Image (cartoon, helix red, strand yellow):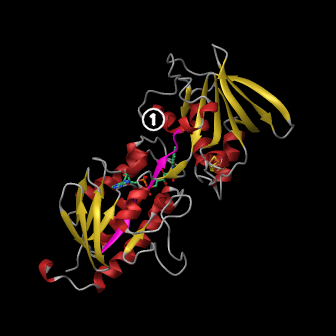
Amino acid sequence: MTQPVLIVGGGPAGLAAAAALASVGQESVLVDKETRLGGAPILSGYAKLVPSGEWAKDAIGAMVSGVEREPKIQRRLGCTVTRFDGEPGAFRATLSDGSLVDASAAILCTGFTHFDSINKPEWGFGAFPDVVTTTQVEQMISSGRGIACPSDGRKPERVAILLCVGSRDRQIGREWCSKICCTVSCNIAMEIREALPDCHVYIYYMDIRTFGLYETNYYWKSQEEFKVKYIKARIAEVTSDGHRLIVKGEDTLVKRPITIPFDMVVHAIGMDPNVDNGKLSSVFGIALQPQGFVGRANAYTTLGETSRAGVFVAGAATGPETIDDSIAQARAAAFAAYALARRAPVPAHAA
Ligand SMILES: Cc1cc2nc3c(=O)[nH]c(=O)nc-3n(C[C@H](O)[C@H](O)[C@H](O)COP(=O)(O)OP(=O)(O)OC[C@H]3O[C@@H](n4cnc5c(N)ncnc54)[C@H](O)[C@@H]3O)c2cc1C
Ligand code: SF4
């Protein structure tokens, strides 16, 4: 018998880590501050995922059901960890409900926080109801309500998607690229064109980062098959003429000012460090990266180690990550935590 592994966060990474441990007979305790498992794709109501094209509720929902059926995974929802003492092989976590969990290792799968577009006020979010975020569009699609302007429910005839909102923006202290939002935006643009064939969809970009195979399946496909239009631009502001939204900026290819009216403007929001990272850093005694994401030890010779031995990290807690990569990292961290659990002597009180 080994001590369980503590997993904090039940999004794609945490679910994958728990399932991987259970598959080799290792018990785990999965803690999430929310009362529902699934992380961002479920809690924020994502629609069809890239690159699988599966609905988030089916793909991530299947991971949740697998974990819920598994007797080797104890779930502690609506809880956080308030203390974490001990050493590798013999940790003790105190949860916010006062209960104690003895664990051989911990894996932090605490993910990210969506950028709040209110922090980019000149681009109209909060001022105009028809300026929305990619998560809001995902929710319109996944709920079955369809694409509609929040102000009056009309079907938009013209939609602008603005990339890099809350990413690659030094002015607001966010230098990083959020990695997945170009691809997600191409996908959303195609979904809008499919649902509303008469709607014109424009993507305003600095650079397009549909990395790897996404270039063919999203960037080119959206232009060639779905007639999505791309404008390389610096956006100055989003205003309204009382009837339509007005996107003002500079077309950086022809170096001319452009002013184009739209019915709906979508912010492709980025991935911020989890707002809890300061607390997690002090509770678990782990270092953060300068940008605020959880730091990793050597990426080549260790599997998801943090600065504290026996505490591992996986997924978007470490920086912007895709679901696939979050899952892969979580399985690697689970392997490392399992190796540690097998080596550790079981304390007398738990044997
Ligand atoms: C608009 C948008 C669309 C996206 N679409 C895609 C897509 O189609 N395909 C794709 O590959 N990626 C997509 N992504 C990225 C995707 O959201 C992440 O890759 C994925 O959610 C990372 O999983 P995770 O488990 O690491 O973190 P999360 O999904 O953020 O899960 C973290 C979990 O930890 C819990 N938690 C947080 N803090 C604490 C705490 N202090 N104590 C306890 N629990 C805590 C949270 O409640 C949550 O359940 C998208 C991102 C955005 C912004
Ligand atoms: S993935 Fe694209 S939209 Fe997202 S931050 Fe990077 S360049 Fe900008």
Q: Position of residue 129 (x, y in %)?
A: 53, 23
Most extreme residue toward the front is 282
Q: Callout 1, which amino acid? A: Gln
Q: Position of residue 313 (x, y in %)?
A: 43, 67
Res. 111 image quadrant: bottom left
| Quarter of the picture holding the N terminus | bottom left
Question: Which residue corresponds to the image point at 35% horizontal and 59% vertical from the top-left?
Answer: 15
> Position of 8 compared to 293: left or right?
left
Residue 281 against residue 144 in the figure, above or below: below
Secondary structure beneath dot 1 equals helix
Residue 250 position in % (x across, y down): 79, 34
Instruction: Compare residues 241 and 136 and report the one nearer the observer.
Output: 241
Q: Is residue 231 visible to the viewer in this orientation of the structure?
A: no
Badge 1 is on which residue? 139
Start-end of magenta stretch: 105-116
Looking at the rendering, in which quadrant would you find the C terminus? bottom left
| 88 vs 315, nearest the viewer | 88
